[in-house]
């Protein structure tokens, strides 16, 4: 999380170009939205079962991360992304949709904004689909969230390969297994022989095609590395920050 925010800060300052980052998780972990209540998850269960919990820099609701591809995208509010929150969601959603379609997955992108009780019914991100997010077979496949500033934004997204139903139910106090299965789906249900490397390549190719650019592979800049270390200490490893709401 510190790396994503550090990259975003560097991009917004003009020190780095718009950046797509693709990564995974060393072990199952829970991320909660920036403004979400910690009581939305069963924290004692997470502690007992050695499941790290981190507060994201972006909004939205909680996600159990594990066997998946996670992406973050940072940019200023210009060019393709000068038309605000919903249009940015739509454009990035279209890029991810195009990548998944390379594997023959039938994807639907939501074109209406969820509001009120429909949006807030569950603390689990994958229990409802918001504007610009992607579904497969009527179930949510990709969860995304944004943080916006006057000079740019950060979007984070999760593409689960499989759904750990038992752990998800316990973290989010979901009693019915069918309830969970009706709302979310893992990518390997549609692509059983999914290759992680090929999916990353498809994501890069799709972003290049969608935004008519060429991606350049790069490690962290010294500035990004320094910022990430500072943010890690100040925020992301701090129990006070994680538990504050």
Image (tube, rainbow, N blue to C red):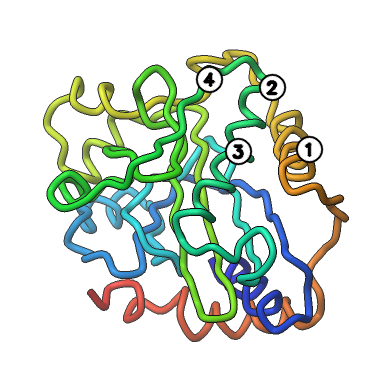
Q: Is residue 70 above or below residue 238?
A: above
Q: Nearer the viewer, residue 154 or 91?
A: 91
The first of marks 4 and 3 along the sequence is 3
Q: Can you tell which mark lies on residue 96?
A: 3
Residue highlighted by disc 2: 102
Q: Crowdedness of circle 4 by 10 Å Cα count: few (<14), some, many (20+)?
A: some
Secondary structure beneath label 2: loop
Q: Residue at x 33, y 52 (%)?
A: 62
The first of marks 3 and 2 along the sequence is 3
Q: Is residue 216 above or below residue 96?
A: below
Q: Can you tell which mark lies on residue 165?
A: none
Q: Nearer the viewer, mark 4 or mark 3?
A: 3
The first of marks 2 and 1 along the sequence is 2
Tell whether label 2 touches label 3 (CB within 8 Å). no
Q: Crowdedness of circle 1 by 10 Å Cα count: few (<14), some, many (20+)?
A: some
Residue highlighted by disc 1: 205
CA–CA distance between discs 4 and 1?
21 Å
CA–CA distance between discs 4 and 2?
14 Å
Secondary structure beneath label 4: helix
Q: Residue at x 39, y 66 (%)?
A: 55
Q: Can you tell which mark lies on residue 188?
A: 4
CA–CA distance between discs 4 and 3?
16 Å
Q: In this image, 187 relative to 20: left or right?
A: left
CA–CA distance between discs 3 and 2?
10 Å
Q: Nearer the viewer, residue 160 or 141?
A: 141
Write down the quadrant of residue 220 in the picture. Answer: bottom right
């Amino acid at each position: 999380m510190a790396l994503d925010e550090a990259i975003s800060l560097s991009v917004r300052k003009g020190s780095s170009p718009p950046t797509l980052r693709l990564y995974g998780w060393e072990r199952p972990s829970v991320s909660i939205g920036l403004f979400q209540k910690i009581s939305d998850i069963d924290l004692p269960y997470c502690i007992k079962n050695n499941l790290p919990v981190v507060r994201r820099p972006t909004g939205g609701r909680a996600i159990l991360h594990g066997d998946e591809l996670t992406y973050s995208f940072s940019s200023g509010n210009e060019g393709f992304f000068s038309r605000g929150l919903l249009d940015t969601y739509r454009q990035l959603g279209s890029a991810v949709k195009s990548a998944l379609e390379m594997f023959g997955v039938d994807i639907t992108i939501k074109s209406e904004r969820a509001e009120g009780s429909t949006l807030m019914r569950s603390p689990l991100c994958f229990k409802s689909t918001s504007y610009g997010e992607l579904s497969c077979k009527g179930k949510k496949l990709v969860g995304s969230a944004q943080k916006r500033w006057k000079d740019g934004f950060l979007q984070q997204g999760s593409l689960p390969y499989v759904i750990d139903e038992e752990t998800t139910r316990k973290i989010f106090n979901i009693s019915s297994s069918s309830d969970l299965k009706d709302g979310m789906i893992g990518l390997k249900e549609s692509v059983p022989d999914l290759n992680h490397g090929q999916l990353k390549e498809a994501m890069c190719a799709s972003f290049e095609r969608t935004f008519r650019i060429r991606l350049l592979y790069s490690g962290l800049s010294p500035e990004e590395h320094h910022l990430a270390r500072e943010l890690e200490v100040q925020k992301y490893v701090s129990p006070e920050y994680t538990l504050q709401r």
